[in-house]
Image (cartoon, grey):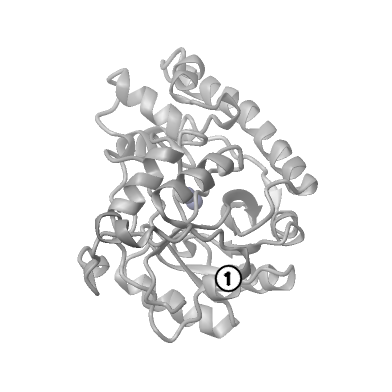
């Protein structure tokens, strides 16, 4: 499989902070021309069986996925895991511990909001969390929009939920080493998610990539919904500098909130080696479609169609 593959290896379902079910995401990915898909809910792999089954049903190749929050130099960094065994006990235990930290953080966030007159935020946010264990800032944001405090979720983050604002709570997640180890020991590949989103200095970013590699991390997201076209170029160079494989994913959460639709990003730059080449043995292949049904079930994706929303 080459870099010219419509792979979308980063998105979220109702199992974490997305608004669509794994089944709806699989159907949407297929309709958008995705060929290889992974569901990567935050700190949770409870949707993996459903996602894999839905992928098989619609004819999508599938890789298991997760997005783990870690703390690195006082910032939260996301590490995507791909192609691991979801039954691995150490990975499951690590994720349970990571999720445990979220409830405590959510209560502290609600306390902070109460101090500026926004009451009932914990209960309010909980109503938006399909999975109460995975309550997150996104659920608080949806509550504050729904209750008319802010006009959209971006405004909520800007006014209330980022560092220095009343609902911000510093939280210590897992260590980089732990997350990378959980993923790799379970047979998967660890990938640094959307590196341009972190506010690291050049030296700190160098430390992140160096330590990540030292712990056994192998990949980095180059083409993601969180990056600009210029950042694709920057992180393509970083991938080559550190000898990392490149990944591609929309980070799609919701039809109304996400600015990047599943499967619509540009292809990976041709000089990079895609993560799926090293993960070929971990891909759950979709059963070959019956020849008679091929024409109706396989949408004709024109070469380059996935590039249409580039920029
Ligand atoms: Zn992320
Ligand atoms: Zn994500």
- Residue 255, placed above or below residue 310: above
Q: What x and y, as percent, mark residue 286?
A: 48, 58
Instruction: Name the residue nearer the viewer: 298 or 168.
Output: 298
Residue lying at the far right of the rendered structure: 90
Q: Give the x, y percent position of residue 200.
A: 53, 63
Q: Would you say residue 40 is visible in this rendering?
A: yes
Asked which quadrant contains residue 298, the reply is bottom left
Residue at 22% x, 68% y is: 305
> Label 1: which residue?
280
Q: Is residue 236 left or right of residue 282?
A: left
- Look at 44% across and 61% down and name the residue there: 288
Name the spot of residue 252 as percent of width and height, x first.
38, 48
Whether residue 311 is visible to the viewer of this picture, yes or no, is no
Name the residue nearer the viewer: 180 or 153: 180
Residue sitting at 60 percent across and 68 percent down?
204
Mark 1 is surrounded, within 10 Å at the Cα level, by few (under 14), some (14 to 19) or many (20 or more) other residues, namely few
């Amino acid at each position: 499989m080459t870099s010219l593959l419509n792979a979308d290896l980063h998105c979220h379902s109702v199992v974490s902070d997305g608004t669509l079910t794994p089944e709806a995401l699989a159907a949407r990915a297929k309709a958008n021309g995705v060929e290889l898909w992974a569901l990567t809910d935050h700190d949770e792999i409870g949707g993996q069986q459903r996602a894999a089954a839905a992928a098989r049903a619609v004819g999508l190749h599938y890789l298991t996925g997760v997005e783990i929050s870690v703390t690195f130099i006082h910032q939260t960094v996301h590490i995507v895991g791909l192609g691991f065994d979801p039954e691995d006990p150490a990975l499951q235990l690590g994720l349970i511990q990571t999720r445990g930290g979220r409830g405590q953080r959510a209560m502290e966030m609600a306390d902070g909001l109460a101090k500026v007159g926004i009451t009932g935020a914990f209960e309010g946010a909980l109503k938006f969390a399909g999975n109460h264990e995975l309550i997150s800032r996104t659920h608080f944001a949806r509550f504050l929009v729904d209750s008319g405090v802010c006009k959209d979720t971006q405004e909520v983050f800007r006014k209330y939920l980022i560092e220095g604002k009343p609902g911000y709570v510093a939280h210590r997640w897992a260590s980089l080493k732990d997350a990378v180890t959980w993923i790799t020991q379970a047979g998967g590949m660890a990938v640094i998610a959307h590196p341009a989103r972190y506010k690291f200095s050049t030296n700190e970013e160098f430390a992140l990539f160096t330590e990540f590699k030292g712990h056994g991390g192998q990949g980095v997201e180059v083409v993601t919904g969180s990056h600009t076209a210029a950042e694709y170029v920057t992180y393509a160079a970083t991938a080559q500098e550190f000898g990392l494989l490149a990944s591609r994913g929309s980070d799609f959460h919701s039809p109304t909130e996400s600015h990047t639709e599943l499967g619509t990003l540009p292809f990976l730059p041709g000089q990079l080696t895609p993560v799926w080449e090293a993960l070929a043995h971990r891909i759950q292949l979709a059963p070959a479609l019956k020849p008679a049904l091929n024409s109706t079930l396989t949408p004709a994706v024109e070469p380059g169609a996935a590039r249409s929303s580039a920029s």
